Amino acid sequence: MKIRVLIVDDDQHAIQLLKSYLKAYAYIEVVGTCNHGEAAMDFMRNHPVDLLFLDIEMDGINGLQLAKHLQSIYPEIMIIFVTGHAGFALKGYESHPVDFLTKPVNVLRLEKALNRVKELKSSTPVAAKDTNHKIGMKVDGGIHIVHVHNIIYIQKKGRKILIHCRNGEVLHSNDTMKNLETIFSAYDFYRPHQSFIVPLEQIKAIFPDAYSRSYSIQLTDDPTLLPLSRDKYQELKDLLLSKGVAIY
């Protein structure tokens, strides 16, 4: 098991010290270092990362703001905050970090934090990523059991929520798009537009219009072109990158 690490700190000496400590752990791979939040965001658009060591006190975007932003795009990323002031820890708990380390980093506390990272990495439930999983959907007249992998996309059409399946069946859900988005995010579904939710693995192509003011998504198993909101374009690219899809 390899855990890819990005260190974000505006103190270069602190970065080098932490890197020297991390060399003792064969399963840790430091894939990059950044001195500010903007550089970290740019790095993560082009490189997959499992764990962030994140300084809280930085000029510009501070660590707490950066953690909130990155977790909205990469919900599986793990964060260990590093700070010179323990008082910042209370605010940081909103980001559900693995741990807080105070500077100078204590090697015993570091090892404890990394053991927790290993536990979280190895205990990620497989079922949550298993698209062959069955789920009960609230539909007209009761509950309909469907295989997640049979769902091509979910659509809001007027007041109706339609679940389009591979066999041509269209289910009418009594749920809300917001609730369905939360449920299906665990199965790698994504909401590219307020009216659609799609499985990431079904995305075959992304097309801009002639002026790049809007975009469309083409799916593998359905010819329908679905809309992609302009403000979701970069977020979708980042998500695909985090799933191992290199975009050049």
Image (cartoon, helix red, strand yellow):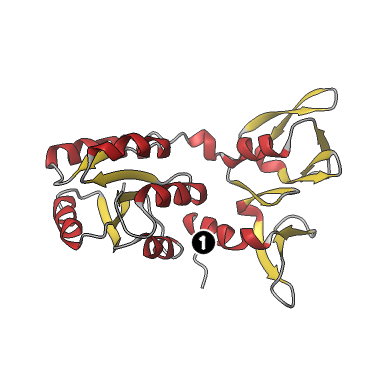
Q: Position of residue 24 (x, y in %)?
A: 14, 50
Q: Position of residue 227 (x, y in %)?
A: 74, 59
Q: Which one is in front, 93 or 98?
A: 93
Above or below — where is 189 with respect to 179? below
Q: Residue at x 66, y 42 (%)?
A: 149
Q: In the displayed structure, does residue 121 sit left or right of residue 26?
A: right
Q: Residue at x 65, y 58 (%)?
A: 203
Above or below — where is 104 with respect to 245? above
Q: Position of residue 168 (x, y in %)?
A: 83, 45
Q: In the displayed structure, does residue 182 sit left or right of residue 10?
A: right
Tell me the quarter of the picture where residue 78 sits: top left
The 10 Å Cα crowd at callout 1, few under 14, some 14 to 19, many 20 or more, is few
Q: What residue does disc 1 label? A: 245
Tell me the quarter of the picture where residue 209 sits: bottom right
Type of the residue with mark 1? Val
Query: Is residue 118 among what the camera can see?
Result: no
**Element under disc 1:** loop
